[in-house]
Image: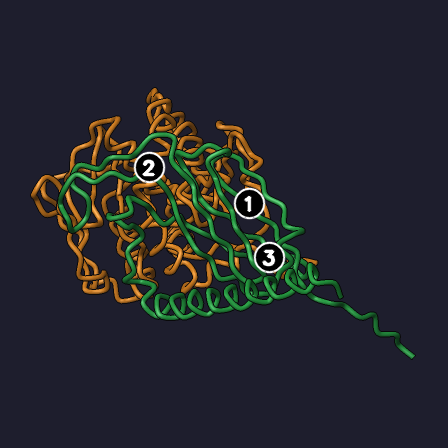
């Protein structure tokens, strides 16, 4: 649909994504995807195996321990891959990026895409342990979610990179699961990220202790203020607030 | 009017004038900073303070402000409100250190949060209510709007 040639996936190592699970963690509501992804990289000691580059991304490079890194990177752990972004995806890059990733997953025979994010809820302050909701695309994805026994988002709207990703998955018959935890819309939410990681660990079949994440929650909320601010501005530009609306019913 | 009341009246007027001048200065500063919102850093190294993330919502009757205040206890928060501004100050339970902070690339330490918020509508600060849970401060400020019921003939 969109010109995906504007996005390039660069492999730093030879990777085999056949039958793999690909996790996507983009900055969105409560930075849930980013926080959960960073925690997974650290906890599972995932290896950086590639990155994505595009003229549609801002001219930005991350410096860590004196070394430059692309802001959208690919990590691997056994047969699981993770695409992590440290920048909010600019609206102009959403469709080409979705198309590129879904085609890459399909061509390389990946098993399933797992998108992790937050569901903005107005009463988040009163929720001690956020619930995780899911949306699925494909029969295999349905079966994965059935085994987990978590609630499905039955009605509503999705806006943003994951919505575009779902469109592509639906169009190209790629299995995809969205895991979305109840979250603060405009504040970094490590508690919501912990809920997502808990569900994700069951899908991956790996034991992950979320205690270190919760212990660092306050520090993370301080560190991620700037990214949250730019992400909120980007979400406003892409009309993210429409998610709060009630969609016209498909079948009355 | 007795002498005592007259003096009180003069002091109240002087106070109002000062308050008005203070408000105009605040507005002017806010106006300047709003135009540079993206570039404005969210910290002040000299004062060792951070600017918290803030969200403002409006309902028909209220302005609802929420503020993200991690590392803060309820008793350490000070809120001052006027009819169109809200000033938040909060001391952290322990200072937060960062080894290589942003462009300064030095060890920095922050001890408090501070933010002056310009409200989108006039409010009645005397009727405001606040609560603090999970490090989030929520302040509900009733709008200062007189409503008139209009009958349909």
Q: Tag 1's secondary structure?
A: strand
| CB under 8 Å between discs 2 and 1 | no
Give the labeled residue for mark 1. B138
Task: Tell me where residue A118 appears, x and y as whole percent.
Answer: 45, 43
Whether residue B50 appears in this view of the structure is: yes
**Chain on which label 3 sits:** B
Front residue of A243 and A201: A243
Of the two numbered discs 2 and 1 in the rendering, the one whose residue sits closer to the viewer: 1
Q: Is residue A184 left or right of residue A248?
A: left
Quick one: quadrant of the C terminus of chain B? bottom right
**Chain on which label 2 sits:** A
Mark 2 Cα-neighbour bin, 10 Å: few <14, some 14–19, many ≥20? some
Callouts 3 and 1 in the same chain: yes
Q: Which mark is residue B63?
A: 3
Mark 3 Cα-neighbour bin, 10 Å: few <14, some 14–19, many ≥20? many
Front residue of B48 and A71: B48
C-alpha span from label 3 to label 1 = 10 Å
What colour denotes chain A? Answer: orange
| B126, above or below B97, in the image | below
Q: Which mark is residue A106?
A: none
Whether residue A111 appears in this view of the structure is: no
Q: Earlier in the sequence, mark 3 or mark 1?
A: 3
Task: Tell me where residue A201 appears, x and y as whole percent.
Answer: 37, 26
Mark 1 Cα-neighbour bin, 10 Å: few <14, some 14–19, many ≥20? many
| CB under 8 Å between discs 2 and 3 | no
Give the labeled residue for mark 2. A220
What colour denotes chain B? Answer: green
């Amino acid at each position: 649909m969109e010109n995906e040639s504007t996005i390039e996936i660069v492999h730093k190592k030879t990777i085999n994504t056949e039958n793999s699970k690909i996790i996507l963690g983009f900055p969105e509501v409560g930075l849930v995807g980013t926080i959960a992804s960073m925690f997974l990289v650290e906890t599972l000691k995932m290896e950086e195996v590639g990155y994505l580059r595009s003229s549609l991304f801002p001219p930005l490079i991350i410096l860590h321990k004196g070394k430059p890194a692309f802001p959208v990177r690919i990590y691997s752990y056994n047969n699981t891959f993770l695409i992590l972004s440290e920048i909010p995806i600019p609206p102009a890059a959403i469709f080409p990026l979705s198309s590129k990733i879904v085609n890459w997953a399909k061509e390389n025979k990946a098993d399933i895409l797992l998108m992790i994010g937050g569901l903005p809820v107005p009463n988040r302050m009163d929720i001690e342990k956020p619930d995780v909701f899911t949306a699925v695309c494909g029969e295999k994805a349905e079966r994965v979610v059935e085994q987990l026994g978590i609630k499905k988002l039955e009605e509503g709207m999705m806006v943003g990179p994951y919505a575009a990703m779902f469109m592509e998955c639906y169009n190209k018959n790629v299995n995809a699961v969205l895991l979305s935890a109840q979250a603060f819309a405009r504040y970094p939410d490590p508690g919501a990220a912990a809920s997502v990681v808990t569900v994700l660990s069951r899908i991956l079949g790996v034991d992950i202790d979320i205690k270190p994440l919760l212990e660092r929650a306050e520090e993370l909320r301080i560190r991620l203020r700037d990214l949250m601010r730019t992400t909120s501005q980007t979400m406003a530009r892409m009309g993210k607030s429409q998610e709060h609306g009630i969609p016209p019913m498909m079948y009355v | 009017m007795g002498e005592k009341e007259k003096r009180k009246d003069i002091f109240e007027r002087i106070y109002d004038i000062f308050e008005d001048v203070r408000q105009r200065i605040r507005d002017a500063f806010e106006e300047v900073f709003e135009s540079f919102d993206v570039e404005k850093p969210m910290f002040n190294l000299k004062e060792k303070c951070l600017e918290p993330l803030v969200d403002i919502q409006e309902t028909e009757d209220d302005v609802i402000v929420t503020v993200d205040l991690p590392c803060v206890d309820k008793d350490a928060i000070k809120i001052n409100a006027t009819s169109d501004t809200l000033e938040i100050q909060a001391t952290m339970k322990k200072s937060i250190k960062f080894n290589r902070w942003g462009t300064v690339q030095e060890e920095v330490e922050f001890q408090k949060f501070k933010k002056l918020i310009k409200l989108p509508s006039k409010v009645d600060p005397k009727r405001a209510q606040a609560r603090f849970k999970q490090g989030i401060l929520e302040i509900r400020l009733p709008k200062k709007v007189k409503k008139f019921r209009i009958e349909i003939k």
